[in-house]
Image (cartoon, helix red, strand yellow):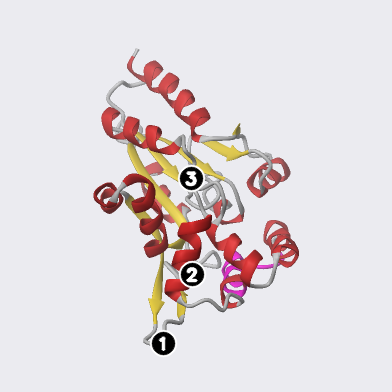
Amino acid sequence: MSNTKQLYVFSDFDGTITQQDSNDYLSDNYGLGQAMRVQLNQKVIEGTLSFRDVFARMLNSVPLKYEEALETMKKNVAIDPDFPPFYDWCKKEGVRLVILSSGMEPFIRHLFEQYLGKDEASKIEIVSNGIDVHEDGTWNIVYHDDTHFGHDKSLTIRPYAQLSEEKRPHMVYCGDGVSDLSAAKETEHLYAKKGRDLITYCKRENVSYTEFETFADIHKALIEFKAKMTA
């Protein structure tokens, strides 16, 4: 392998970097409930419903206003404690880290602020959906694109994959759930979280992956991979 190639890490946020999926938490506890959410996610895996429609249904079922939703997330959703050391390693080693999320950027940055500090949170590269907050505090998601995913993560990865062999970076993706289906086949290697919907999809579609439990697993594997790159 060429030692001049950069390593790009594309990662989902909710349920991958966080220990709990913030949107699932809101939906399960304040909206349509866990049983219905699980049932709807299964339909996304089966291809009978679009992620965009299911996600909108989940969020629309949550009656909390923006500030209430934000505070609820900050109190109840934690970042994997092994992620900050991994983030520091990426900065030190020149690894490009890109967050690809079907969540909403303001929520994501606020959670990063809580665990990494405001300065670092402002620097993290995030490609995600947006949010429209109304005068009365109600809010709605603003989708990143017009695809049936609402945010098709493959559209960010694919331009790099299509570069010539000399210019193409080494790329990995880290994910856990139905929002990651569009990205599952787009990188050299996939890290899929243990016990989550992405593994169910990968087994059905015969997609190669490495199972992980925390970012310590990914961190260790990529340290070894990067050592091989420069050997």
| Above or below, 4 relative to 175 | above
Q: Which residue is mark 2?
A: 69
The three-letter amino acid code for the residue at tag 1 is Asp
Q: Position of residue 43 (x, y in %)?
A: 72, 63
Between the residue at mark 3 and the residue at mark 2, the CA separation in whole angstroms equals 19 Å
| Above or below, 17 relative to 128 | above
Q: Position of residue 92 (x, y in %)?
A: 27, 29
- Going from N to C along the chain, the mark reached first, 2 or 1, is 2
Q: Which mark is residue 17?
A: 3
Q: Which residue is mark 1?
A: 136
Q: Nearer the viewer, mark 3 or mark 1?
A: 1
Q: Position of residue 204 (x, y in %)?
A: 73, 45
The three-letter amino acid code for the residue at tag 3 is Ile
Q: Identify the magenta region.
A: 48-57
SS category of the residue bearing label 1:
loop
> Is residue 51 in the magenta section?
yes
Image quadrant in which you'd find residue 129: bottom left
Horizontal side, residue 85 vs residue 91: left or right: right
| Above or below, 158 relative to 188 | below
Between the residue at mark 3 and the residue at mark 1, the CA separation in whole angstroms equals 31 Å
Between the residue at mark 2 and the residue at mark 1, the CA separation in whole angstroms equals 14 Å
- Which class describes the residues within 10 Å of circle 3: few (<14), some (14-19), or many (20+)? many
| Above or below, 19 relative to 50 | above
Q: Residue at x 45, y 79 (%)?
A: 139
